[in-house]
Image (cartoon, coloured by chain):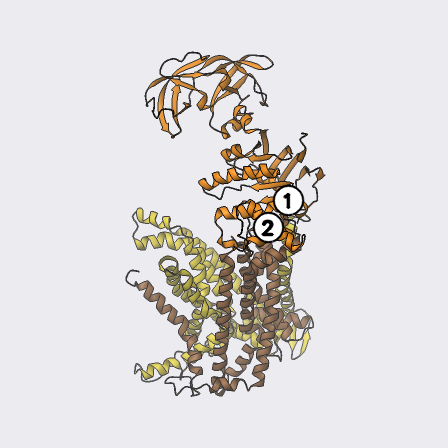
């Protein structure tokens, strides 16, 4: 490489801008003082130890995991069919259908949240984890569809034809050829959609009723300065988990596009 | 031996809206022959192959395989197997499992293993069962695809541009091997290709397609010697095209006046579908004589001037302008003595035998 | 395989997704529209049709103020984010050696919880927060800066951080699509680096810029978390008012009206933006 240009310098500064704020959470989660400011008083793991003692937090964690699991599986399942349809077949209104499925990405969160609350109550569904999961499937679907679309993009259509040609029927072909080849994409989609649901706040805030998910629980704690260190420790764990899941997802996504052609 | 038709296409047509990818296809394929569908890209040859395989349904007409009408029979229930252009090697399975794919659950394990080993031997990949699909070279992928199809013991093997992904040397070797394989197995091979040399060297018969229609179905030698029209003539090999007028005709001969060369008697071409008074004559470049003096024993001669010399190694091409024809005439001479006899600007004589002038019917 | 046409298979396979999304977009919209013509006093819903909510929403100075501020903040966030992101996208597409690593680095922070990232900025910008304590400790300031948190600046900064990958990726994609020979041709025809950028690179990336702007602008207008956490009273936006109607104020009809109006204004601004953006792109020669 030539001497670092101003552009490279800017890029490094920008990276710092992206990472530093996020890294302050774990940094101060080890601070023994309760005020989030320099200088750091001392190092401690107390805040992490205390997390396990909080029953409402544990309950919120399980709520989030449950909702995330359901949302991830269902959005990936629905997305799998849609992605296949979009990549493999040509039909009238296809572009409109693809656009519609991407819509949840761009509707302002407050509007999705308020309108779903109104809808679910109208349908007689009380706010609960079920309504949160229904909402999260909606939000996660664009992510699932775009990941699975790229998995199918890399999937040579003649593989399925070769299977039919060798005397194997439609469903068995799906099980023996399509699924294994697209599997890394499916895993990536499940990981990403789980993370989307796990981190989502506004919709859960509106729709969870008295069954808070983890972000809703954190929101309720943020207001109390005394709880800050707790939130920091919890937040750091969440950050770490999300990033870990996403890096895993990226690994699988790469694997799916590295093969199959 | 009575030759039985293994595949019969009658009145087959495939339309996409108003576009006809293939139409009016009538074709009988004989048991045990190597047949090629030849044509430029987009001519519909792959569509025909896929209708035989069952990946596309004809809009009209019937496909019969081994005496059975294939209407409504899906690809997985047809007695055909295919070698795909991309080879479609399952990336998540090793070589052995790729080849065994179609037999799984239909034969005992031990038998599958034996047949896989046998099939891999046949394509000279013996012992490579455990090799990963992504560790194969292009030629190996082609062989795996071949073994995977042949292990099903198809009545007909379909090959979609099977050699186009290989480099030239390997392609020539595989042409030879596939031809041998076909002859030893005695299975009907139907191959789609855009490469005329590939089609000529491998096939018993060739079907030439243009714009969704079968223009001519014939043996390679006959296609070369008696193409049915100008389009086929120019697609297969090189051909000088000259206009001619018919002065008189009998059952199997024409008396014609050929541009530049003058009057001569030629044989009527039985393959011509559109005869007429004003016809065109095709002359293969290697069948013209080129001399510095007027050649003897030729019924038609013309004097001209060399405007271009191209050295090909095994032969030499001259382009010669003559009076009475606006395009230069191509002449090809074998390189017998490592000498180039003529140079640009030389005055030469061209000689034409009646047997070398091919009647191509009316032009377009 | 032979049973049905490709189109039929396409429709039936994509139906679950399109029907689910379509239903969850259309049905609530219909109900929101209905609500916006109803009225509510405490817990009783009056279903007689009235324009009262619209009259209230259009005349209430607070609503007007918040709506305009939402759009202006969203506009500012969009411009700042895209302006900061363009050089990065350009760097990754044109200069960086390990593009995939850079793209991964850019997207990783985005995958942490949005709520937590905003929360982190609150801690950084606070009066007794990370930034002030660090600057004080370094002796750069004598007393804490009070303009950092609880204002529009904090909202714009926080969102510029939150939306970074959404701006970088579309611009990166459009830069990536530029055929290098176009740039060589521009140089060959006598352009210097700056002219080449203005006349070739920039115009060709306008679709990416427009996409980035829309992806950022639309959700920002309706953002709730950031104004609530770092906006203070000066940084409140329309979403906070909508939440109040569905929460504490318990006036769903007004909340529904505000949601619809927010959606309409977003749509209107977005359409105007796309049209002018495309016009601008065509004027460069």
Q: Who's yellow, chain-wise?
A: C
The answer to whether C65 appears left or right of B102 in the picture is left
Q: Disc 2 vs disc 1: Cβ atoms closer than 8 Å?
A: no
Q: Who's orange, chain-wise?
A: B
The shade of chain A is brown
The answer to whether C129 appears left or right of B89 in the picture is left
Q: Quadrant of residue A11?
A: bottom left
Q: Where is residue B200 in the image (x, y as percent from the top left)?
A: 52, 32
Circle 1 residue? B153
Look at the picture and state if C132 lies above or below C48.
below
Q: Earlier in the sequence, mark 2 or mark 1?
A: 2
Does residue B51 appear in the picture of this structure? Answer: no
Seen from the viewer's position, the closer of residues B103 and A203 is B103
Seen from the viewer's position, the closer of residues C265 and C130 is C130
Q: In which quarter of the image is residue B169?
A: top left
Q: Mark 2 and mark 1, same subunit?
A: yes
The answer to whether B340 appears left or right of C121 in the picture is left
């Amino acid at each position: 490489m030539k001497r670092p240009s101003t552009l490279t310098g800017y890029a490094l500064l920008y990276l710092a801008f992206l990472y530093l704020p996020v890294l302050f959470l774990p940094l101060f989660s080890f601070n023994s003082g309760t005020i989030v400011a320099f200088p750091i008083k001392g190092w401690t793991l107390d805040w992490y130890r205390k997390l396990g003692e909080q029953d409402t937090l544990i309950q919120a964690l399980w709520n989030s995991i449950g909702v995330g699991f359901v949302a991830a599986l269902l959005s990936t399942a629905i997305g799998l069919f849609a992605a296949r349809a979009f990549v493999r077949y040509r039909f009238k209104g296809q572009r409109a259908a693809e656009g519609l499925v991407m819509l949840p990405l761009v509707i302002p969160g407050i509007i999705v949240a308020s309108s779903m609350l109104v809808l679910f109550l109208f349908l007689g569904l009380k706010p609960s984890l079920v309504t949160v999961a229904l909402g999260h499937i909606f939000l996660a679907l664009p992510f699932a569809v775009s990941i699975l679309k790229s998995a199918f993009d890399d999937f040579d259509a003649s593989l399925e034809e070769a299977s039919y040609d060798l005397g194997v029927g439609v469903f068995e072909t799906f099980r023996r050829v399509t699924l294994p080849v697209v599997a890394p994409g499916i895993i990536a989609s499940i990981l990403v959609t789980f993370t989307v649901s796990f981190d989502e706040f506004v919709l859960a805030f509106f729709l969870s009723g008295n069954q808070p998910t983890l972000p809703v629980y954190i929101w309720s704690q943020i207001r109390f300065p005394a709880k800050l260190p707790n939130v920091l420790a919890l937040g750091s764990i969440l950050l770490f988990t999300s990033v870990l899941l996403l890096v895993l997802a990226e690994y699988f996504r790469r694997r799916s596009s590295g093969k199959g052609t | 031996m009575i030759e039985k038709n293994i595949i019969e296409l009658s009145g087959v047509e495939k339309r996409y809206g108003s576009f006809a990818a293939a139409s009016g296809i009538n074709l009988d394929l004989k048991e045990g022959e190597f047949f090629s569908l030849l044509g430029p890209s987009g001519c519909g040859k792959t569509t025909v192959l896929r209708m035989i395989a069952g990946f596309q349904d004809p809009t009209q007409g019937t496909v019969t395989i081994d005496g059975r009408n294939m209407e409504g029979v899906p690809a997985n229930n047809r007695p055909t197997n295919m070698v795909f252009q991309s080879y479609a090697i399952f990336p998540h399975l090793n070589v052995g499992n790729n080849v065994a794919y179609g037999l799984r659950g239909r034969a005992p394990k031990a038998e599958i293993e034996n047949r896989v080993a046998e099939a891999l031997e046949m394509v000279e990949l013996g012992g490579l069962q455990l090799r990963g699909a992504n560790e194969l070279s292009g030629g190996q992928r082609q062989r795996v695809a071949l073994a995977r199809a042949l292990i099903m013991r198809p009545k007909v093997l379909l090959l979609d541009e099977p050699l186009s992904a290989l480099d030239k040397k390997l392609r020539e070797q595989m042409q030879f091997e596939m031809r041998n394989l076909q002859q030893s197995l005695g299975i009907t091979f139907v191959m789609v290709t855009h490469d005329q040399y590939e089609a000529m060297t491998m096939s018993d018969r060739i079907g030439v397609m243009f714009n969704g229609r079968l223009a001519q179905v014939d043996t390679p030698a006959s296609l070369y010697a008696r193409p049915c029209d100008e389009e086929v003539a120019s697609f297969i090999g090189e051909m000088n095209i000259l206009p001619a007028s018919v002065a008189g005709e009998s059952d199997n001969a024409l008396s014609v006046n050929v541009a530049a060369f003058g009057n001569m008697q030629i044989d009527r071409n039985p393959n011509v579908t559109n005869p007429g008074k004003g016809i065109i004559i095709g002359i293969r470049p290697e069948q013209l004589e080129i001399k510095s003096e007027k050649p003897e024993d030729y019924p038609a001669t013309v004097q001209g001037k060399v405007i271009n010399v191209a050295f090909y190694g095994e032969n030499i091409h001259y382009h010669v302008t003559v009076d009475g024809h606006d395009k230069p005439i191509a002449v090809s001479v074998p390189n017998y003595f490592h000498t180039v006899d003529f140079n640009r600007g030389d005055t030469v004589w061209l000689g034409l035998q009646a047997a070398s002038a091919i009647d191509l019917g009316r032009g377009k | 395989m032979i049973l049905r046409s490709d189109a039929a298979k396409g429709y039936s396979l994509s139906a679950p997704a399109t029907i689910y999304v379509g239903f969850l977009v259309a049905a609530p919209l219909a109900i929101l529209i209905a609500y916006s013509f109803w009225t509510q006093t405490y817990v009783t819903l009056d279903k007689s049709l009235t324009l009262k909510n619209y009259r209230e929403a259009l005349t209430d100075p607070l609503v007007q103020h918040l709506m305009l501020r939402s759009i202006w903040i969203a506009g500012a966030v969009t411009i700042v984010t895209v302006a900061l992101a363009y050089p990065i996208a350009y760097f990754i597409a044109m200069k960086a050696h390990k593009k995939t690593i850079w793209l991964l680095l850019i997207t990783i922070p985005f995958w942490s919880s949005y709520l937590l990232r905003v929360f982190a900025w609150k801690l950084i910008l606070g009066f007794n927060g990370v930034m002030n304590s660090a600057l004080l400790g370094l002796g750069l300031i004598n007393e804490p800066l009070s303009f950092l948190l609880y204002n529009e600046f904090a909202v714009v900064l926080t969102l510029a951080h939150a939306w970074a990958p959404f701006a970088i990726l579309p611009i990166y994609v459009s830069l990536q699509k530029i055929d290098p020979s176009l740039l060589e041709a521009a140089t060959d025809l006598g352009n210097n680096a700056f002219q080449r950028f203005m006349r070739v690179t920039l115009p060709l990336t306008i679709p990416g810029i427009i996409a980035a702007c829309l992806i950022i602008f639309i959700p920002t207008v309706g953002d709730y978390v950031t104004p609530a956490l770092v906006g203070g009273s000066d940084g409140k936006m329309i979403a906070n008012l909508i939440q109040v109607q569905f929460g504490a104020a318990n006036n769903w009809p007004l909340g529904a009206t505000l949601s619809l109006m927010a959606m309409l204004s977003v749509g209107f601004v977005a359409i105007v933006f796309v049209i002018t953006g495309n016009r601008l792109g065509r004027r460069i020669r």
